[in-house]
Amino acid sequence: MATIKITAYGYPTYYRCDLSQAAAPISYWSDGDWVSTQYQCADARHRLDIMAELAFRLEAQASEVSLDQYRSEAEWEELDEYESGGLGVG
């Protein structure tokens, strides 16, 4: 399971996906649980950087800002199993 942390405007958001499974959902962490998005691993071409780009799109839309503006404020990083363990991943 691949997990990323996106930090934008001082707030973190978390996304995960099983990049080995084409039909696996890309999910985000909300209120103590993982919520599936409309995207699947196949949409991310089984790549973490494309998964992050899809997450940026979702976050920009939720923040009601343009994708370019969100990109200029956001950064992402991959979390290892230890770091993501508190999110119910490990």
Image: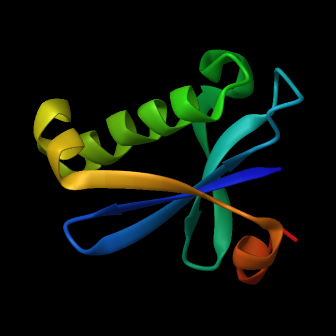
Q: Name the side, left or right, on which 20 lies relative to 28.
A: right
Q: Position of residue 1 (x, y in %)?
A: 83, 50
The correct choice, above or below, for 32 with respect to 26 in the image is below
The correct choice, above or below, for 72 with respect to 11 in the image is above
Q: Residue at x 80, y 33 (%)?
A: 19
Q: Residue at x 54, y 32 (%)?
A: 49
Q: Position of residue 74 (x, y in %)?
A: 27, 53
Q: Name the side, left or right, on which 75 lies relative to 81.
A: left
The correct choice, above or below, for 67 with respect to 84 in the image is above
Q: Residue at x 34, y 34 (%)?
A: 57
The correct choice, above or below, for 67 with respect to 17 in the image is above
* Colouring convention used in this rendered image of the protein: rainbow
Q: Residue at x 68, y 55 (%)?
A: 3
Residue 55 lies in what quarter of the image? top left
Count every numbered label the image shows and give the total. Answer: 0
Q: Position of residue 37 (x, y in %)?
A: 57, 40
- Residue nearer the viewer, 63 or 9: 9
Quarter that holds the C terminus: bottom right
Looking at this view, name the residue that lies furthest to the bottom. 86
Q: Position of residue 44 (x, y in %)?
A: 62, 22
